[in-house]
Amino acid sequence: MKSKTYILTLFLIFIGLASVTGQELPPIESFSTEDYRAENQNWAISQTANKFIYVANNKGLLEFTGADWKLYPSPNQTILRSVHAVGNRIYTGCYMEFGYWQPSADGHLRYTSLSENLALGMVEDEQIWNIVSLDNYVVFQSLNRIYSYNLDSQTFSKIEAETTLTKMIKADRTLYFQKYNQGLFKIESGVEKLVSNDAILKSNIIVNIFSRSGKLIIQTKTKGFFVLEDGQLSKWDIPANDYISGLTVYSSICLNDGSLAIGTISNGIVHLSASGEFDYRLNQDQGLLNNTVLSLFEDSDENLWLGLDNGINCINSASPYRIYKDKNGRLGSIYTSRIYKDILYLGTNQGLFFKPFDSDQPFELIEATKGQVWCLTVIDDRLFCGHDSGTFEVEGTSVRQITFSEGTWDLKPIPNHDDLILQGNYNGLNVLERKNGKWSFRNKLTGFDMSSKYVEILDADHIFVSHEYKGVFRLEVDGTYHKVENFKNMESVSKGLHSSLSTYENDIFYASNRGVFKYKLEENVFLKDSILSESLNTETYKSGKMVTDGTGKLWFFSENNIFYVTPGHLSETPKVTKIALPSTIRNSISGYESIMHTQGQNYLFGTSSGYIMIDLDKVKEQVYNIKINSVHNYTTDTDANKNLVAINETNEFTIKSNNFAFAYSIPEFDKYLESEYQYRLNGDYDQWSNWSKSYSELFKNLAFGDYTFEVRGRVGNTPTENTATYSFSIAKPWYISNLLIFIYILAVLLFSILMHNVYKRYYKKQKSKLIFANKRDLELKELETEQQLMQLKNEKLQQDIENKNRELAISTMSLIKKNEFLNSIKEELKSSETGKGLKSVVKIIDKNINNTDDWKFFQEAFNNADKDFLKKVKSIHPKLTPNDLKLCAYLRLNLTSKEIAPLLNISSRSVEVKRYRLRKKMDLPHEASLTNYILEI
């Protein structure tokens, strides 16, 4: 019999493990040792009124602000075993030590020991394993004693144990504890009182106790749950008994909703409903960091915290999301989903999968549908599957292919034609027809061959087709749906990546990165819808995909949200409801987002690795507060002493300490919500910063003056209720203090007087210098004028000289010509045979050639042109004769011997002789040029 029970238990556990593959689980946040920067084991968890989380870790006390972790080392460098927050105090216990931590003015926790005030001290090697609070008492439990600390009188009382104290638990405002081998006790009026000494409670370690309908429910480590009523112990009869009976439990908690979370030693956590039914199980395969759960804690937002043997997990139990994770990639990316006849179908890039709806069974593939599924549509109470290879009709767990035209994007019923369906394909539009109760391919609409991803029927004769790379087209079809008679591009909207068409409330909408547009039939244009476009603008655009869910909602998907539109209740203005689900977290396929109504307010949203179940009833507006956690002040970047300063006080700092680092956070622990921050520093830059996920900010080298740092935040779409502020001032440097400013002013006045006198004398001197300079300038101008006059005279004289030179040249040439002419006549006469009577003529000619008047005329002209030249030559060479001076004058004119000969009435040879004699008289060396010498005189 025992073996059969054991086998049954193992079978049920196996079934439970197998069903994990089909579980839709709450979001799980994970914090590894690298995240919180401490050791592996985490023994207890608690929370203060400001929502900060505190964890008892092997290395000390961990503080989590919602943004960052901080470690406070254990007061005596031993393992911290317990933590419990009461008000703003965090009580902790470890080896031979217990006390409390309290934040100081700078936000840093300071430790105060309580154990050192014990009159008799602690038992050797005693460790505090548990701390609870009740009324005005804080109670510390070790394996040897229970210490009760009165908060009012600050005194202790204790309960000794002859055996091991295994656990202390508060239930229904009563403290219970177990003495091993003695039974279950409670503290009443400060003393212990036996509750039950049942054999089961003596020999089995009690893990948890809670009250249910006036009865005590007692959970043991290995034997499951028991009910204690009127002193009688019996097995608690719940559906999950067989499942949990094989578990070894280390920790347990009864949650606010009455459900139970059970932490095991090697099987993760098991969640039971309030009625004791198995809900789900989480272990490392489903996202936990470790399978040994040392502690459990439910925070004020109903998040379930797990202190693990290696790491920390936070399960968002109250989250509106439940996650189905396709860990092995068997499903692929989900493009469409549908519930049909109580079967959940998922269309993915790997085929069509199914399972019974609202069951934990694994999904199965319909083999004939391997490949890309684009749509699942119910028409005529039949489910059609649009596939890459055509169109299928789905019948339970099998399919029948009814068209083989590649790529069926979507299917739409044709108005007034119950036996026809229009489908958009890769190659255009096709029509399905029902004959004898079966659907089959009828024809392709000729005249339009563009890929028809989005198709909306306006009326019996007009169809809209959207192509994200070509735009929106309005097609006119014939009455039998055999051909497209004409089509045109709608110029009122532009093409756009991930754009789409959808019909909602009898209106056709088009969405792209330019916004949302509604078709106006009267004007035959798409007009921008300002209300919807506010939520789908260029900055927040991620996808233009629109989905109608059959419940009166039109869904959109932006960068940071998904949102739906519903008709307005009291006006025609639609209501827009946003759900904070950023694209980075939802992990969907842009342009192919899918969402489907399942039941109640639950929706299935497809992702690239499974799907997310969204419960709109659990999407609630919460109040968030932001807090400045610390302010560090320091002098330079390399300053190791970054001083913490009081946060709630206005402080003044020296000009050297003008660098500030602010840390702030919103204590929010939802995995699918993101906290963002915005700050400004009044006094430096009064504009708010851009939204950022950074939870700290640094300001360097601030000038002196008064400052107020302000920071606000938002979680998803919800802004924080408050703006956290910190005011401070930076003192002026010593060299611009008030006293020194007075001294500076006095010095400036004295200096001004001194400089006035100096400048007065200076300008007086400058005036004298200016007068002198003006006088000198006047004289210079007069001198310049005189020089200009002299220059004019010189120019006139030069002009006269040039005129004289021209006259001299003309007279010289005239003489030369005249003498040459006379010589030629003379030679002709001498050669005449009849010389009779000609001698007298020759004499006349000779007389005329040697005429002294010509020489005087030449000499006068020469002296005018080259004044005193003959005198200079005569003074240098006094032995020169008048004929020598005449030769010198001709040489001065740079005349050749041939030109000189007629002037002297001699031959050229004789001129050369004369030149030679002149050189001798002037004592010129043989290599010197006579002409050059005369020209240089």
Image: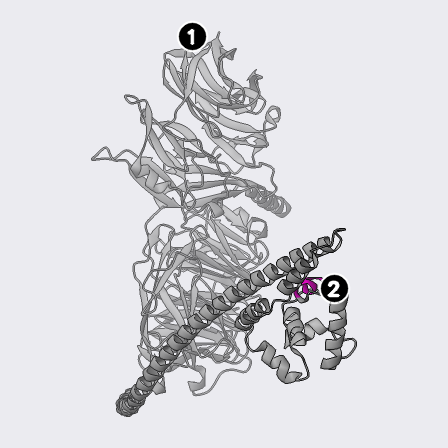
Image quarter in which the N terminus is found:
top right
Tag 1 secondary structure: loop
The foreground one among 896 and 67 is 896
Q: Quadrant of residue 557?
A: top left
The foreground one among 468 and 156 is 468
Q: Quadrant of residue 772?
A: bottom left
Instruction: For label 2, count other residues whose C-alpha is less than 10 Å away and answer few (under 14), some (14-19) or many (20+).
Output: some
* 375 in relation to 97, above or below: above
Determine if residue 778 is in view. yes
Q: Residue furthest right?
A: 926
Q: Position of residue 475 (x, y in %)?
A: 41, 17
The kind of residue tagged 1 is Thr
Image quarter in which the C terminus is found:
bottom right
What residue does disc 1 label? 480
Label 1 – label 2 distance at C-alpha: 136 Å
* 114 in relation to 722, above or below: below
Q: Residue furthest left?
A: 570
Residue range highlighted in magenta: 898-903
Residue shown at 35% from the left, 64% from the top: 680
- State yes or no: residue 899 in magenta: yes
Q: Position of residue 56 (x, y in %)?
A: 49, 69
Residue shown at 45% from the left, 79% from the top: 635
Secondary structure mainly formed by the magenta segment: helix
Residue shown at 62% from the left, 63% from the top: 848
Determine if residue 653 is in view. no
Tag 2 secondary structure: loop
Q: Position of residue 143 (x, y in %)?
A: 51, 74
Q: Colour mode?
A: one colour
What residue does disc 2 label? 907
Q: Nearer the viewer, mark 1 or mark 2?
A: 2
